[in-house]
Image: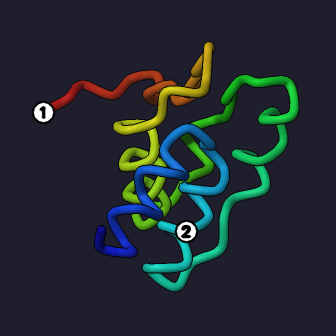
Amino acid sequence: MIDSVKLRRDTAADFFSHYEYLCALQDSVPLPSVRACLREGVLDFNADRLRIVDWAPLLSTLKINKDLPLVSIKSFFQPWLGETGL
């Protein structure tokens, strides 16, 4: 079996290991906010604090992961008062 396929299959059950691996592939650092709640078995973070480049490894890991019973993504963005949308 190809080593990269075996690695992906083995780490698919462990969210943080796979997330860390995908971050390393794109030369980025795993986010502390993602790591913070994983001890409790949940993923809970504020989406407003993520940059565009942070989403790719996170979403790819969520796509194949079978380990997390709860995923909570929050946003506190509120449009400014008086914004017309025109």
Percent coordinates x, y for residue 42 in the rendering: 71, 23
Examine the image and state in which quarter residue 72 appears: top right
Q: Quadrant of the C terminus?
A: top left
> Quick one: SS at disc 2?
helix
- What is the number of callouts on the image? 2
Q: Is residue 54 left or right of residue 82?
A: right
Decide: is 84 above or below 23: above
The image quadrant where one finds the N terminus is bottom left
x, y percentage for residue 82? 39, 23
Residue at figure coordinates x 64%, y 35% from the top left: 46
The amino acid type, in three-letter code, at marker 1 is Leu
Q: Residue furthest top?
A: 69
Q: Is 76 positioned to the left or the right of 80 in the image? A: right
Farthest-out residue, left: 86
* Amino acid type for the residue under numbered disc 2: Tyr
Task: Determine whether, in the image, residue 17 is placed left or right of residue 10.
Answer: right
Residue 55 vertical placement versus 38 (above, below): below
Relative to the observer, which residue lies in front, 40 or 73?
40
Circle 1/circle 2 CB separation < 8 Å: no
Dot 1: within a 10 Å radius of its alpha carbon, few (fewer than 14), some, or many (20 or more) residues? few
Distance from Cα at disc 1 to Cα at disc 2 = 43 Å
Q: Considering depth in this image, is 64 or 86 the residue closer to the camera?
A: 64
In the rendered image, the vertical position of residue 8 relative to residue 25, given as above or below = above
Residue corresponding to mark 2:
21
Is disc 1 placed on a helix, strand or loop?
loop
In the rendered image, the vertical position of residue 70 relative to residue 80, given as above or below = above
- Mark 1 — residue? 86
Measured from the top left, where is residue 39 in percent x and y?
87, 34
Tell me which residue sits at (55%, 68%) in the image: 21
- Left or right, 16 with reference to 4: right
Q: Residue at x 58, y 21 (%)?
A: 71
Quadrant hosting residue 73: top right
